[in-house]
Image (spheres, rainbow, N blue to C red):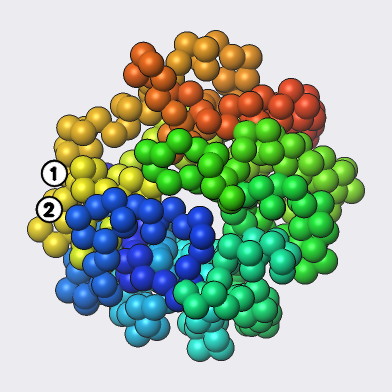
Amino acid sequence: MPPMSVLIKPASGNCNMKCDYCFYCDEQNKRSISSFGIMSDHTLKNIMRKTILHSEGFCSIAFQGGEPTLAGIDFFRNITQYEKHYNRKHIRVEYALQTNGLNINEEWCRFFKENHFLIGLSVDGIQDIHDKYRHTKSGNTTYEQIIRAAGLLDQYGVDYNVLTVVHGEVAGRIDEIYDFYKNKGWHYQQYIACLDPLYEKPGKYEYSLLPAEYGKFLVKLFDRWFCDLEMNQQPFIRQFENYIGILLGRMAEACDQRGTCGIQYVVEADGSVYPCDFYMLDEYKLGNMNDTTIAVMDEKRKEIRFIEESFKLTQECKQCEFYGICRGGCQRSRLKTDNEMYKNYLCEGYKEFFEKCLPKMVQIADMIKKSN
């Protein structure tokens, strides 16, 4: 049995913020039941049991939302107890949690530290950019509370990375953001391209990320990163590290950089399982952790041909000089063409990035090879 990667939404899409570009709010609006509330202890126990018993050697359990901390800290304390109960094979269990930071206090930080949780903290750059789209339901700003949360995580020595959604505002001011993150000591950074609503023509919203903007953003960010790398002071930027890994013959750790969808189990608060966080819709449901075996869910994945759909790239894409490293990007960012194949909406941006930055990435990979 292979290691399992499980992403759990313990509070469904419930959140104490209302970000303008939230992709999960969009998904909730496109299915028959928008929210499943807070996960029951019965469902949690079944998830932990099936996940741990199905894994060999290692499993990854992550929590997302909505805002997962709305489930309460006792919910997460139960998780660690269920791990101890079911983990008779003594497999390695790694925990991660993505949060907007509003609920983070000293009690949460002590729990994260004691139980070795890796935290993803959502921050969109500097204050005016962040507060433009990331606000409470009543429209109040959130940036100062997020900075306070980061300070608490630092104080308690909790491992965390900063996740930034790349929309037009972020893309256009990445130099300022890079400097700010550097001054804050935020060494681990993830940048996620902003998604337009599913099944809608992209580019029409104020927050929409345009392909040309994305290309310029990647080039600027890479140039800053490369300058710091030459001084051995570079932050860990997941996307760049994965590209260099590909050049070294390794499998990309991020599924959007592998070119095809992988095997994931994304679990809603009622136990319903979906193949990807970006496709938690009725038509993609694989089963339920309360009454469906992993084997049956895997067969359902094959039946709906979820992974196979990600193979269907245009010939133009496959014949591109950068295909070997680009691999068509994330399926969620692809648009279907007239012949039922796919091409990435952000293709123009990727091409600009690889044209300008791939030689330096090759240079880095060659240096690593020589040093080993």
Q: Which residue is mark 1?
A: 296
Quarter of the image where one finds residue 296: top left
Image: 156 above or below 121: below
- Name the amino acid, label 2: Thr
* Callouts 1 and 2 close, C-beta under 8 Å: yes
Q: Position of residue 345 (x, y in %)?
A: 53, 30
- Whether residue 171 is visible to the viewer of this picture, yes or no, is yes
Quarter of the image where one finds residue 241: top right
- Say which element carries label 1: helix
- Say which element carries label 2: loop
The front one of 79 and 307 is 307
Q: Position of residue 289 (x, y in %)?
A: 18, 58
Image: 313 above or below 217: above
- Name the amino acid, label 1: Val
Quarter of the image where one finds residue 9: bottom left
CA neighbours of label 2 inside 10 A, class few (<14), some (14 to 19), many (20+): some
Residue that lies at the very extreme toward the bottom in this rendered image: 107
Q: Which residue is mark 2?
A: 292
In the picture provided, is 58 more to the left or to the right than 153? left
Q: Residue at x 17, y 74 (%)?
A: 42
- Whether residue 234 is visible to the viewer of this picture, yes or no, is no
Image: 213 above or below 81: above
Image: 278 above or below 119: above
Location of the N terminus (image quadrant): top left
In the picture provided, is 343 more to the left or to the right than 214? left
Q: Residue at x 77, y 69 (%)?
A: 184
Location of the C terminus (image quadrant): top right
Q: Residue at x 55, y 39 (%)?
A: 203
**Gap in Å between the C-alphas at discs 1 and 2?**
7 Å
Q: Residue at x 78, y 27 (%)?
A: 356
